Image (spheres, rainbow, N blue to C red):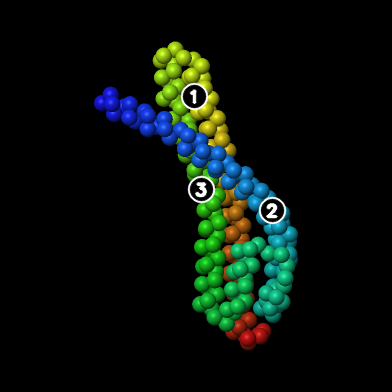
Amino acid sequence: MQYFDKAIFWLSSGLLVPVMVAVAYFLVKALMQVGQFYAQYMARIRFDKQLTAWLAEADEQRIDEFLQSKSEQPALWSEALGQLAKYRHSEAHRDKAITEFEISCEKELDKSRTLSKMGPILGLMGTLIPMGPALAGLASGDIAEMSHHMQVAFNTTVVGLVIGCIGYLILQTKQRWFAEDLNRLEFINDLLRKNVNNGIGGA
């Protein structure tokens, strides 16, 4: 049993460096996502104003005008809208385009989900792993060694929680954005259906 305990101790201690590297990696990813999110947020403000104004007066008569507009649009939205315009006479293809938009949104959200989950997990691992050497230092009376490991434990926890908070906040905001976009795409799809059924617009 003593040998087993020592093996587990050395194994867990050996994980500290990989965990610290992973924390640093996800921190960089989180900061990059903050920068990308800010750019998307600013573009989103302009996009929402334009789209809200159009949707307030939208009908099947004006759908072609909207589909041909060249205003700045989010990438996923623009791609889905292009598919709706391309397959305006095929309801099955339009429904498929909307489903593919949902899948693409989920892939985009997975980036933030990873941060929100991995941050706290790595932070907890970075807290617990140094506790073993810290307690060993306390038992041997080496206060300096214990203090060093406790600092590592607490700092890793804080960084992990910061990563998790960034991921969670971005996730919540993007979920709301994509829900709004999906609702708008379905509305536009309904307008296209009426447009086609009434024989309005080009082929």
Q: Say which residue appears at 52% left-offset and 49% top-offset.
A: 113
Q: Quadrant of the N terminus?
A: top left
- Name the residue beneath numbered marker 3: 114
Considering the numbered disc 3 on the image, is that residue within a helix, a strand or a loop? helix
- Name the residue beneath numbered marker 2: 39
Q: Nearer the viewer, residue 7 or 39?
A: 7
> N-terminal of the two: label 3 or label 1?
3
Q: Give the distance between the C-alpha atoms of the residues marked 2 and 1, in whole angstroms.
A: 39 Å
* Left or right of 56, for residue 137: left
One can see residue 107 in this view: yes
Q: Nearer the viewer, residue 166 or 4?
A: 4
**Most distant residue in the top direction:** 141
Q: Say which residue appears at 60% left-offset and 64% top-offset.
A: 76
One can see residue 164 in this view: no
Considering the numbered disc 1 on the image, is that residue within a helix, a strand or a loop? helix
- Residue 170 at x, y percent in the picture: 60, 49
Amino acid type shown at disc 3: Thr
Q: Nearer the viewer, mark 3 or mark 1?
A: 1
Q: Give the distance between the C-alpha atoms of the residues marked 3 and 2, in whole angstroms.
A: 21 Å
Q: Quadrant of the C terminus?
A: bottom right
Q: Are marks 3 and 2 in contact (CB under 8 Å)?
A: no
Q: Give the distance between the C-alpha atoms of the residues marked 3 and 1, in whole angstroms.
A: 27 Å
Q: Are marks 2 and 1 in contact (CB under 8 Å)?
A: no
Amino acid type shown at disc 1: His
Q: Quadrant of residue 190?
A: bottom right
Amino acid type shown at disc 2: Ala
**Please, is residue 96 above or below residue 23 in the view?**
below
- Residue 143 at x, y percent in the picture: 49, 15
- Residue 61 at x, y percent in the picture: 69, 80
- Name the residue beneath numbered marker 1: 149
Considering the numbered disc 2 on the image, is that residue within a helix, a strand or a loop? helix
